Amino acid sequence: MLDTELTSLEHRTNRLLSVGAIGMQGASIRLGEQLYRTVNPEVEIPAESVVIHQIRSEDVKGAENISTTFDELSRFIRGTVLVGHFAHIDLKILRKEMAETGHDLENPAIDTARVHQWLLGQGRYSEDLALQLEKLDLQTVAKSYGLNPQNAHHALGDAFLTAQLWQKMLIVLQRKGVSNLKKLLKIGAAK
């Protein structure tokens, strides 16, 4: 499970603020295997971003060197399939910033928002289906699976919530005959 917090969602200027990851083996969350790092983006963090993720410029002044962070992240995710909610956003910033430090990110990745959309399309029709297909933020989707979201917009907290969501999704996916990586990537690959 992987999540990031960014200075903004503007793809040309956003910078990484923090990264969180939690290990899973199948449907088991491995709480002892987690990584959380803050990163100094070396730009002023906009006030509107601070309101969302509570990371201020002074909170990242003493952060670990970004190259060291990417060394640790690369070791942590080596040989894994990445799973994240709106993972394409996380992957885009990570690929951009990792490339600047000589790191790469080639892991296959699954987006739980895309998987959720697919599962909704496989279910029974309901009057509010169009609304459900639009309300894809992590907290809303987690609630729809009976989870109680807490600590929103914290990279490690969101990675843990995504891991819990993934556990629930795996059960539904198996019932629908989606039982291998090739099928998972077909319906939920992060692009």
Image (cartoon, rainbow, N blue to C red):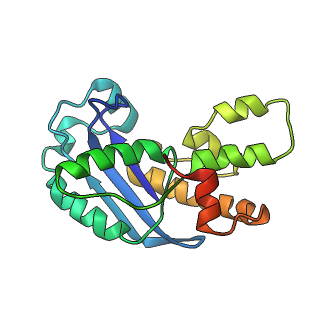
Q: Is residue 69 above or below residue 126?
A: below
**Horizontal and vertical percent position of residue 11:** 34, 32
Q: Is residue 78 above or below residue 134?
A: below
Q: Quadrant of residue 22?
A: bottom left
Q: Is residue 149 visible?
A: yes
**Horizontal and vertical percent position of residue 16:** 28, 43
**Horizontal and vertical percent position of residue 185:** 58, 57
Q: Is residue 13 above or below residue 18?
A: above
Residue ID at (50%, 49%): 190
Residue ID at (76%, 65%): 177
Front-lying residue, 4 or 13: 13
Q: Quadrant of residue 37?
A: bottom left
**Horizontal and vertical percent position of residue 99:** 23, 51
Q: Is residue 154 visible?
A: no
Front-lying residue, 139 or 103: 103
175 to the left or right of 158: right
Tell me how many marks there are: 0
Q: Is residue 138 above or below residue 102?
A: above
